[in-house]
Image: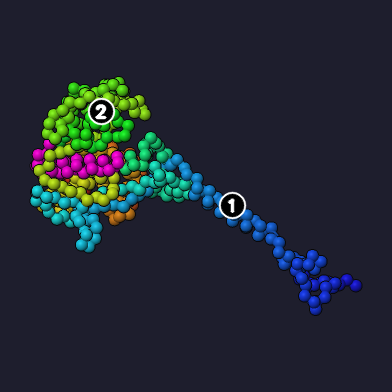
Amino acid sequence: MRTIRRLGEPSAAADPGQPTDPFDPSAPRGGGRDDGRLSGANKLVLAMFFFILVAAVAGSLVHLPYAVMSPGPIVNTLGTTGSGDDATPLIEVTGLPSYPAKGQLDFTTVRVTGGPSYPVDAWDVVEAWLDSTRAVLPVDEVFDPTVTEKQVEQESAVQMASSQEEATAVALRAIGQKVPTYIVVSDIVEASKATGLLQKQDRLVSVGGEPVTDGQSIRTAIQKVTPGDPVTIGVVRDGKPLTVSVPTIRTDTGQTAIGVLLAMQHDFPATVTINAGDVGGPSAGLMFSLGIYDTLTPGDLTGGIQVAGTGTIDDAGVVGPIGGIRQKLAGARAGGAGYFLAPASNCKDVVGHVPDGLEVFKVATFAEARVAVEAIASKQTGSLPRC
């Protein structure tokens, strides 16, 4: 007669009245799942867990040569910075009458990761690919690979200061003020041979014997010189005219340069201060010019409506293209704007990417932008050009 033992019962050889030493190799072992070994299914689950863990760690450690552009916050040029007793108007004017303005004239921003000292990992890139409001680009298309983080910050700050200066000039001229313009040395780069020859705030009046009219005229004159040869530069320093001979250098692209950063400088009839915080770059120029104009004129340019936009502005009031237009459209809508001013030269990037509830109007000059805002204020936008 066969004895049938239930799973987990001691064998007939074992004395159920005596304790079993688990460390005794001769002691009986339980069968089935009680023997301490993992089942095939549990092994698979554990293997998958460790695979995912390793992949997650590896993905966060592997830095990729990409930059990720995401919608940033919007800032009202007619508003304030800070809060409570520390609140300060973003635009302050002294020396001319100024007027409080309602509504919003928002400049838009883009968050960029992946530049010098801010690398992105595999998960950052995958997450951005899955988000239609973000963009993934080769990092070299966004940042010059030959510059450092400090140089990027310096250039961005110079661009912001220049955009504010040109926006102020455009707005003041729009209310009938005269504003003379000069081009000055704003900084000298480390590789330049102009150190000790040129100084910050030198006003350039001629390059290679050619009169300076704008930044392009300077670049054109310098390209006539072979890299390494000197170029004659006429400047005004502390009100006195000087002529200096500056050795040129060769850029990584083979062009001739003198290794200085230039900026516009104006003689303003009033002081306009823009408290924009640590935002950099030139793309807020258009909205700054509209905000300054609204501050310098009675009434509300916007009619109390929220209008966002972007675009560079030059000394002649021409609106230039910017990067990250799709992210700025998304940021403007997320911030509550229903209307957006886009540079006409960015229209090809706007079409097909306008968020629901946002109307986009193309502008090529400050004058066109002002007309657009006035039309929005009066709710007469039917004739405005769109992308």
As drawn, 183 above or below 211 = below
Image check: 31 left or right of 177? right
For mark 2, does the 10 Å Cα neighbourhood hold few (<14), some (14 to 19), or many (20 or more) residues?
some
In the rendered image, the quadrant that contains the N terminus is bottom right
Nearest to the observer: residue 144 or residue 302: 144
As drawn, 153 above or below 29 = above
Magenta region, main secondary structure: helix
Residue picked out by circle 2: 219
- Disc 2 to disc 1, how far (Cα)? 56 Å
Residue 279 coordinates in the image, percent (x, y): 28, 48
Q: Residue lying furthest right in this view?
A: 1
Q: Residue lying furthest bottom in this view?
A: 17
Image check: 68 left or right of 4? left
In the rendered image, the quadrant that contains the C terminus is top left
Q: Amino acid at mark 2?
A: Arg
Q: Are marks 2 and 1 in contact (CB under 8 Å)?
A: no
Q: Secondary structure at mark 2?
A: helix
- Magenta segment range? 154-180
As drawn, 206 above or below 331 = above
Q: What color scheme is it?
A: rainbow
- The verdict on residue 172 being magenta is yes
Image check: 182 left or right of 343? left
Q: Which mark is residue 51?
A: 1
Q: Residue at x 27, y 43 (%)?
A: 157
Q: Residue at x 30, y 41 (%)?
A: 154
Residue 241 coordinates in the image, percent (x, y): 13, 29
